[in-house]
Amino acid sequence: MRSLRDFKVPDFKFPKFKLLNFEKIEDFIDEVKKKGKTKEYKQGDPIPEPLRYNTMQEVFNVVTEKYKDNVLVTEKFNHKGQYEEITYGQFREDVIGLGTGLIEYLGLKDKRVVIISETTYNWYVSYMAMLCGVGIAVPMDKELPANELENLVKRSKASAIIFSSRKKELVEKVRPNLPDVEYFIEMYSDADLNGKDVGFNTVKNIGKKLHENGNNSLLDTKIDKEEFKVLIFTSGTTSASKGVMLCNRNLTENLYAVGCYVNISEKDRLFSVLPLHHTYESTIGFLYPFSIGASVAVCEGLKYIVPNLKETKPTALLAVPLLVESLYKKINLNIKKSGKEPLVNTMIHVTNALKMVGIDVKRKVFAEILENLGGNLKYVVSAAAPIDGKVGKWVEDIGMEFYQGYGLTETAPIAALTPQSDRRVGSVGKAVACGEIKIDTPNEDGEGEILIKSTTLMLGYYENEEATNEVIKDGWFHSGDIGYMDKDGFLYITGRSKNVIVTANGKNIYPEEIELLLSKVPLISECMVYGKGENEDLTIAVKVIPNYEYIKENVKADATEEDIYNMIWDEIKTINHSLTSYKAIKLLEIKKDEFEKTTTMKIKRFAELKKDKEKEEAEKAKKEEKK
């Protein structure tokens, strides 16, 4: 699927920190002593065995009855308005209504339905109705350009498209070229059926009336847990997108996998900021909290993250490294501006020492920082790409729990996860309880391709048996990712095999390893390491987007482009000293525009390198013309 072109993490606004609670640390310690020492999760502490379901229909029936009065979704439908709460009971009615309407009124039983919109309540209703028995759900990236949307709708053989009003113009653009699409269903619309057009509310309300009169066609549907039920197109960071076929077993086993390692409950609230067409958000950010009676707070958009955190007060945040790192950098920059950096570092050491002896006062000492993240945030989960270990450690240092996960669309998505009982910052965790991980033909450092065998593994690639057989061999999925495992079974990711740079003498260089070092340089906002040229002419190069704000405020306000280049090059030379000679960066390019990215904010390397190649070929053609 198409990336978020020109994506840029917003400039988070935080007030100047006073950190007055530092002066009260002795009072906090006395208070804890009176109540008794705090109990932390330690290695071996048990987590209650989670329920294990066969289908999402089964999950739906259990939790919407058990938690019918609990809040499921809180969303601000009007930016100027307040957050509105929707219960599990209301959700049950809406899902049954929509599902019954899609089956009986529109005749879409067992057909494929595209869902394309921003994160919103009606997306959740649509997805769950499909999973509960309508047909095959095809969630799509809301950032797709018209030609790609048209292509994927055709490839998926969709019979209907459910879309938000924000996507109406896009859908109208491709509509004339989609004769096989029977219905175009607009979310939150009351429009009557007119040709192929109909309002979402109309379908839902007709379905509700049919259900009230005894029609139970949705939940009477018998679902085979191995049946193809979800089609998701990959983001294509290294190649063209493939269609991943998922079944109910994939989804419910993900819920079980998370429940075995992390102990959250119906009292928790997850903050939804990532795109729902991605399995990371739709499975772990929606289906998992749904399965335990918890709630989901919908973020209005990236630029509203901080105010929305304060308004909704979530306990858990699912994020990608770029987002966590940006919050880390911005908060620490404000601490530095406040002149409190030495004091904060001292208090981190003091509170860490106290925690070791069972006195945990972190959330009280660092309350002011936590209040800027809503005040209740306890769990931060980072996945989709490697993250600097010091960022994860900082999350723990100020009183939250930091988790990492590893997986792919093909594992729907979880394959490994940090256990709550042993949060090793830097590792992406251990293989899930319903799966295995092994390293294929490890080198002298124990690194090799990561192979996965799990009940979360996909059925295969849609209409592409050859590609399926290339990646699944003897039941093991060949991920294309490179990593190693420690003696306790914790997995560490070091790179991606398709990104590997091979030198003339056969040495392998994984760019992610070098990028992680560069990400620690405050002068650098983003970077991409790559190999320029071939064989004997191969040069290790890096494209860098400078952190102009940091440079202006902390280094040199009137820095020229040449100044910035030289400052960054000096930092690169320092890093080169820590690398073996063949990994040293020899070429620096200051990038003027944004990197092309996937919707989980990973740089699309193949797209960036393709642009370079096209540019080089164009320049070469110009030179030939002059001759």
Image (cartoon, grey):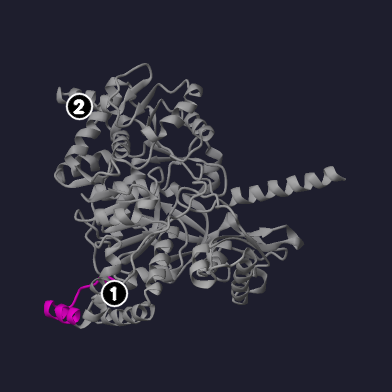
Q: Which mark is residue 208?
A: 2
Instruction: Compare residues 143 and 568 and report the one nearer the observer.
Output: 568
| 204 relative to 277 in the view: left or right | left
Q: Earlier in the sequence, mark 1 or mark 2?
A: 1
Instruction: Compare residues 200 and 366 and report the one nearer the observer.
Output: 366
Quadrant of residue 590 in the image?
bottom right
Q: Which residues are magenta?
A: 27-44
- Whole-number angstrom distance, CA of label 1 to CA of label 2: 53 Å
Q: Check the image and report above or below for 207 versus 437.
A: above
Kind of residue indicated by mark 1: Leu
In this view, the residue farthest toward the right is: 627
Magenta span has 35? yes
The residue tagged with tag 2: helix, strand or loop? helix
Q: Residues within 10 Å of mark 2 (few under 14, many from 20)?
A: many
Q: Which mark is residue 255?
A: none
Q: Check the image and report above or below for 223 versus 68.
A: above
Q: Which mark is residue 19?
A: 1
Q: Residue 539: where, in percent of width, then height?
A: 70, 63
